[in-house]
Image: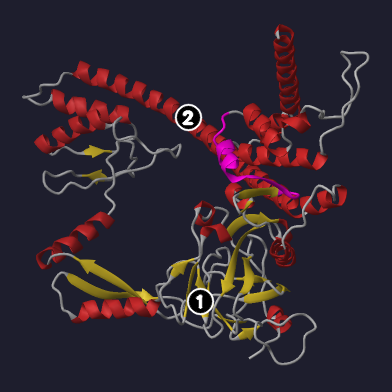
Amino acid sequence: MTTNMAERSRTAETGSDIGGDEIIAGNVNKYTVLPAGYSGQPKKGHLVFDACFESGNLGRVDHITEFEYDLFIRPDTCNPRFRVWFNFTVENVKESQRVIFNVVNFSKTKSLYRDGMAPMVKSTSRPKWQRIPSKNVYYYRCPDHRKNYVMSFAFCFDRENDTYQFAYCYPYTYTRLQHYLDNLQRRNMDYFCRELLGLSVQRRQLDLLTITSPEDKTDLENSVMQKKIKIPKLSLNHVEEAGEVTDYGEEDVELRHSKRQDGRKQSEGTHKSIEAVVARLEKQNGMSLSNTSSPEEAFMEASEGMNNMDDAVVPRILYEELLRSYQQQQEEMRHIQQELERTRRQLVQQAKKLKEYGALVSEMKELRDLNRRLQDVLLLRLGPAIELEKVKPETIEPEPEVQKTFSEEANTSTYFPAPVPVMDKYILENGKVHLGSGIWVDEEKWHQLQVTQGDSKYTKNLAVMIWGTDVLKNRSVTGVATKKKKDAVPKPPLSPHKLSIVRECLYDRIAQETVDETEIAQRLSKVNKYICEKIMDINKSCKNEERRESAKFNLQ
């Protein structure tokens, strides 16, 4: 049951142009993935992969960690450049076992996985296909795999005795199709016809289906055959061989065509007027055009034939004007074709530039998203630990469940997780909201703060919720005395860890409105200014209150 992955990888052939991954001959067959250095019988939790069934595709599995596996899919038959489809099963799982599967050799740069699509999953106890939640699916360019696009998805197995099956989308097998066509054929419907068109490379039959009314079958076959016949266009530039005479009859007209010497196709519109005149002369008199080497000679002979006709209605002067007009149109057409070719080359160059620019824009957007996710994760995981060491008297020890969750995430995650929503980031408990570093605020005031308009008002109200007016009026942001007064005494600075909490809350608010890093940094730089203004407002209101109290005392 257990195979050696090293021996399987040695049987691989050289890969495709896209990514240069190896092409592995054959699917995995009940392959048990064991950790490095492990020897012995597989235990519960050592996953067993299998793709040896119809429409299955999984060529290789690499064990990264206990919670992470790299999956390699086989390319399309006779086309190693395309690698998209996957379909495999997983068994021998443990209950509540969490894993991350990385499909690392996708050949497509653009995929619906970037727009919300998710892989399919089912199990033996739940045979109906379901989609994995899109929040657990990531599609990105990975530098560890030659900058190929990688699709990663997280999954938690919930039943030990189930066999789970994962697929790119809803599978539709060849056998199912053949059964469906056989059922249709057995019904002997007049408007349905099934024929064998040929066999595929793997000796599977290719069916030709015709769906139409019985009386239209013969007409349909005739129309299809007529569409395949190429009818040549009439041209006066054909140079016939010496001594050969071509007769044009009234009913059986043989159309001859030739290509211009410069290789360009002649336009049907430029010959329309001349061809009409010549065709009419041919039908009326059955005259023959022989040994004509240019349009001028054809017109001269046609005009002489008309002069000999008793019922001629087109004078020679009109033919000469038509000839000159034809030559002018031909010259104009040549210039237009040159201009069109020049314009086509310019459009091709512009299209290449736009394609490169679009790829750069999409890559920059992905890098910004990954950078923001990384910042959120670092602030969420490392921030509380650092602040607890700096400010031990002012902080509260986090709950054991929260610590356990952080440790599990740190041990099991090697790729960037999904960004945590703003409302899910903060812990609600007993009518209080935990902002981090042991800082709790009232839940009702927190919800009122979320609907506050403007960064200034939001920052000022949040500062009052964290410190209170009594603390703010006796503190300063930096702890440095003002330079406006010579005898000014410096006030104690505000707690650095609480200032960082204010910046994090404002960052989460701004990140919901824009993704421009420059704008976010510019708006975050004004946090100290807003808090200074709030401290000045509090001191000013306190002085005004003292003046009013002293005025009342004097009046009394």
Number of marks present in the image shown: 2
Q: Which residue is mark 1?
A: 165
Q: 13 left or right of 254?
A: right
What is the basis of the colouring in this image? secondary structure
Q: 308 left or right of 527?
A: left
Q: Please rate how many residues cluster around mark 2, counting C-alpha atoms within 10 Å: few if below 14, some from 14 to 19, many from 20.
A: few
444 part of magenta stretch: yes
Q: Residue furthest right?
A: 487
Instruction: Indicate the amino acid at tag 2.
Output: Gln
Task: Decide if residue 234 is in sight here.
Answer: yes
| Along the viewing direction, whichever of 78 and 366 lies nearer the viewer | 366
Q: Position of residue 519 (x, y in %)?
A: 66, 31
Q: Position of residue 429 (x, y in %)?
A: 62, 54
Point out the stretch of residues depicted in magenta: 436-453
User: Measuring 56% from the left and 65% from the top, which residue is drawn there?
Assistant: 83
Q: Position of residue 232 (x, y in %)?
A: 29, 47
Q: Residue furthest front?
A: 556
Disc ID at residue 338: 2
